[in-house]
Image (cartoon, rainbow, N blue to C red):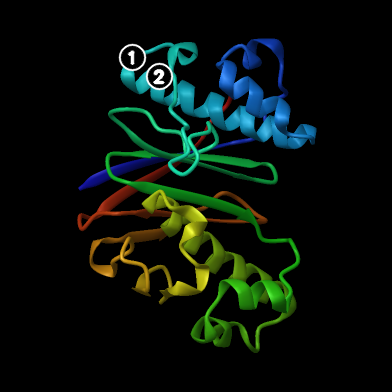
Amino acid sequence: MIECAVWWARPVRGEANELALLDELEHGRFEAYRREIDQRRFLTGRILAKTVLGAQLGVAPGDVRFDATCDDCGKPHGKPKLAGVEFSISHSGERIGLAVTTVPVGLDVETDTRRADDQLIEYALNEHEQAALRGLGSAERVSAFFQYWTRKEALMKATGRGLKIPLQSITLDGARLASSADPALDPETTQLADLNPGDGYRAAVAFLTTEPVSITEQQWES
């Protein structure tokens, strides 16, 4: 049985002692965000990951150094990596999440109170999935859409390829990958589960493994 721990956090304030945990490249990314809330979400994700992974590896949070090199362009804006551990960070609204395990993993969280118009639904869901939303009330339709969205995003993030995999190339049957046109995702070697980030949010986590996974969720306080 593979174990996965998921932590949920709220945005930190962005105080000096928190900013001190970022390395030079991370400071650059932090400053590049124009909105304060986006800065705080990025900062929280890094602090959460450094604190949790540092404790797991016996290293002080400030000494944890991620490799965020983009596989395509070589710039430091890719998925953060750390030797010896598999993890995924996601944030939306007032929720920042971290999933830690031993196999390739993807985590996604989204607010489910945003507008989901027909154009967005047609972009993300194939005909089979769109049909499942028909007949739902407005609020139910939005919530169901973001459930689909987080499941697909989690799957794509688990591969490390992200949005290079078209959303419509993935077909879901509930919290299960039914089929994929991309060879990076095989239903036989993929696990998918919904999470509980709190009211107003949808979240999912995906694993590239044939083994069953045990998931625990907990709150993190800075």
Dot 2 surroundings within 10 Å: few (below 14), some, or many (20 or more)?
A: some
- In this view, the residue farthest toward the front is 73
The residue identified by callout 1 is: 58
Figure check: 93 above or below 192: above
Q: Which quarter shows the C terminus?
A: top right
Residue closer to the observer: 206 or 83: 83
| Secondary element type, mark 1 | loop
Cα separation, mark 1 vs mark 2, equals 6 Å
Q: Quadrant of residue 182?
A: bottom left
Q: Quadrant of residue 111?
A: bottom right
| Residue 65 screen position, x and y as percent | 44, 19
Residue drawn at (29%, 69%) of the image: 187
Residue closer to the observer: 40 or 26: 26
Residue drawn at (79%, 36%) of the image: 35
| Residue 125 screen position, x and y as percent | 55, 76
Please report contact status of discs 1 and 2: CB closer than 8 Å, yes or no.
Answer: yes
Figure check: 147 above or below 90: below
The residue identified by callout 2 is: 54
